[in-house]
Amino acid sequence: MMEPLFQNIDRKECGLMSVALHGLVVTLLFTVVSKPAIQVTVKEARRIFMPVVSDYLSEAPKPKALQGGGGGGDRSTTSASIGRAPKFAARQFVPPAAVLNNANPKLLMDPTLIGPSDVPTPNNAMAVWGDPLAKLGPPSSGTGSGSGIGSGKNGGIGPGDGPGLGPGQNGGFGGEVYSAGGVVSAPALLVQVDPEYSEEARKAKYSGVVVLSIEVDQVGRTRNLRVAKGVGLGLDEKAIEAVKQWRFKPGLKNGKPVIVRAQIEVNFRLL
């Protein structure tokens, strides 16, 4: 007669044990989640993620101040004459001149402009030194000063200030940056180099479009490349490497080559 009583007691104890066990599990879960280490990890992951997104949503490039360039002259009463520009070099021993004041120099050296040696100038096949962007006229080093050719100063060619070429200062190849439209024509692509796939993107089987903001200079080379919209996984860098090798027919303003800003979309697709 005592057996049913013991069965009732066992069931009550089992129910109490079950409630206690579930309560212990819930308590442990709250304890683990509230640990400082996990909270810090979540915060750190958020810090790593947000700057990447903000880079992709950056604003369109704004017009930049003139960069590079130079000018010169010998205070002539006539504008600089057209001719061939010397090459860029790291040092300048002899500045260019369209009219030589010393017809019999003791040491003959070719003139140079200061700038990166791998940057070509917008040149022509003329046999005389001059400003390649000038108009036809009598031989003249220009109205500028400080040697060189042009209306600027300090041993370069053009209206700038320095031993470089074009508007701007401090050497190199300078000029104002334009947007295509109106009297300014857009650059036309002549040589395209396809980008390589990064190993990270290939392993992830990832595809996407990288948008680059670039400038095409007066000789059709790209410069000032910037990622306007990236996809990561090394593809942004691969896009820049490829577009640096692209060559364009430069944009024109009133028939003269000028620097024109443009946007390039580079498609990455796995076949």
Image (cartoon, grey):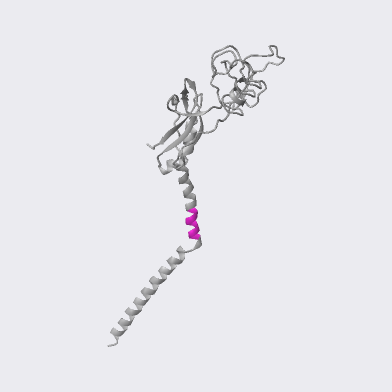
Residue at position x 40%, y 71% from top? 23
Q: Position of residue 193 (x, y in %)?
A: 45, 29
Question: Does the stretch in magenta take in 38?
Answer: yes
Q: Which picture quadrant has residue 141?
A: top right
Q: Position of residue 184 (x, y in %)?
A: 45, 25
Q: Is residue 164 visible?
A: no
- The quarter of the picture where the C terminus appears is top left
Residue at position x 47%, y 52% from top? 46
Range of residues picked out in magenta: 37-45
Q: Main secondary structure of the magenta part?
A: helix
Residue at position x 49%, y 22% from top? 257
Query: Quick one: which residue is furthest to the left in this view?
Result: 1
- The quarter of the picture where the N terminus appears is bottom left
| Residue 102 in the figure: left or right of residue 172 | right
Foreground pick, 4 / 160: 160
Question: Does the stretch in magenta take in 111?
Answer: no
Q: Which picture quadrant has residue 263?
A: top left
Foreground pick, 36 / 103: 103
| Residue 6 in the figure: left or right of residue 235 | left
Would you place residue 268 above or below residue 220 in this image?
below
Would you place residue 241 above or below residue 28 in this image?
above
Query: Quick one: which residue is furthest to the bottom in this view?
Result: 1
Q: Position of residue 235 (x, y in %)?
A: 46, 39
Q: Position of residue 247 (x, y in %)?
A: 47, 26
Query: Quick one: which residue is furthest to the front in this view?
Result: 77
